[in-house]
Structures are given as structure tokens and as C-alpha cells.
Amino acid sequence: YYTTLPNIVMMLSILVLFKKRTNRIIRVLALLFINWLVYKYCTSLHSIVVFAFFSILYLINVVTHIFEKKNRMVDFFSILFYPLCMGLSLYASVYYYQNPASREFLDEFFNNRIMLMSNSYYENGIHLFGNAINMTTKLSEYNYVDSGYMYMLLVYGVIFSILMIGAYTWLLCKIRAKGDGFIFIWMLTIGIYALSNRVFLSLQYNPILYLAPQIIVENYYRVKHTSKA
């Protein structure tokens, strides 16, 4: 599958930056070049765009530490981030065919992904507990709902989607409270990437999921210790 290698290289690039905190600018440029080479080979544009997004936020944080310092605006943004991304995906699906001026650009940049998820929205609708969807194209069987947000809404339903968005928001706020700017930016990157890829539940493409049990356990013992005190 042509997006597998770019996804893995992108996540490994982020892990390299996580492990190596020296010569940051040189490392970012070198990793951008590697991701560009992978893009030229695999033609999967989204992964390099998302890594560029991560790199910009990463370098901004290196200079300003904006995601590590106390800031009410960033705290408020943390609460709204994933719900806003969900709303953006739903809005794009509902109003895609009502905005002809945007179609050509969106189709080219997102490889018809918005059009396809909009088709699925109108064909299948959104249900409280999800719906069995026959995801096929004229050529072969293919899951054409690539947006992680719309995939959850269409396949797993409103209840599951709210729980997942709530869980990711809770994790983002906990990371924010710990002052870990790197993981915070990584989670923002996952949220942006999920606009065009189903990475929310993928351990292969989303290593952030491995952090969730640790954060939950740490929070449990912190609350337990506080209650005893």
C-alpha cells in the first residue's frame, strides 16, 4: 500500500527528534529531505505536509517554549482542538457539493478524499451507534472514508465518536498540564493528520496510543495520593 512507507518514515522522523535534542534545525532539515525522497518515490503527499506542519510547530516551541509555559489561550485551545477538527470534517462533508469554487483545489490536494467521504455521508448518513457501510469503488473494494473523524462518525456512530474525541481531548489536556511541549505538538499533528487519514486507532501509524495507559495510570495514582492527603 503506497501510503504505508511514508507514514512509517514520518513517525520515525518524529521519534528521532524526540530522542535527539541537539542540532535541531539540522536534524529537521535532514528529516524533511528524507521525507521528501520518500514522497517522490511513493507519491503520498500528505505525510510530508504533516511532517512539515510538525516541524514548524516544533521549531517555534524550541524558540519560544509556547507549548510548555502556562498560557490560558493554549489551555483553551487544547479543549477545543479535536472537536473543531471533527466539526471541520463534518462541515466539509455536508457542504462539499454546495461550494463549487473549492472543489478543484480540494480534489487535487486531498486526492478526492473529501468528495468521497461526502458521498459516503449522503449515501449512508450518521447514526447513533454506527452503520454497516459497503465501501467499494467501481474498480475494487476500497475503504474510501480516509478521514479519521468521518470514519468514526459513519462506521462507529455518534456515541463512539464523542467518547474517542473526549479521550483524545483528555490526553491532550493532561500532556499540556505536564508541560511536555513535544508530545503536545505530536498530538496536534495526529489531530491534523486525522483529517485525511484514519490514524486515531492505528498503533502502526500512531505511536501516541502507547502513551495512553501510562498517562491513565499516572493520573490514577496522583488522584489517589491527593485524596489520601
Image: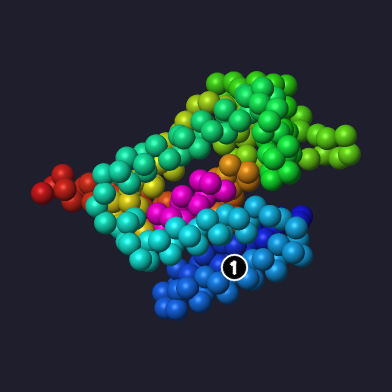
In the image, is 124 to the left or to the right of 81?
Answer: right
Residue 218 appears in the rendering: no
In the image, is 200 to the left or to the right of 60?
Answer: right
Indicate the position of residue 73 as horizontal and vertical percent values: 30, 43
Q: Which residue is mark 1?
A: 32
Is the residue marked by circle 1 packed among few (<14), some (14-19), or many (20+) residues within 10 Å? some
Q: Quadrant of residue 141?
A: top right
Q: Secondary structure at mark 1?
A: helix
In the image, is 89 to the left or to the right of 176?
Answer: right
Magenta stretch mostly in which secondary structure? Answer: helix
Residue 127 appears in the rendering: yes
At a point 47% along the width and 73% down the height, the residue shown is 25
Between 219 and 14, which is closer to the camera in this rendering? Answer: 14
At a point 64% along the width and 66% down the height, the residue shown is 35
Above or below, 36 relative to 146: below
User: Label 1 is placed on what type of residue?
Assistant: Leu
At a point 76% along the width and 29% down the height, the residue shown is 134
Q: Residue furthest front?
A: 101
What range of the chain is rendered magenta? 183-193
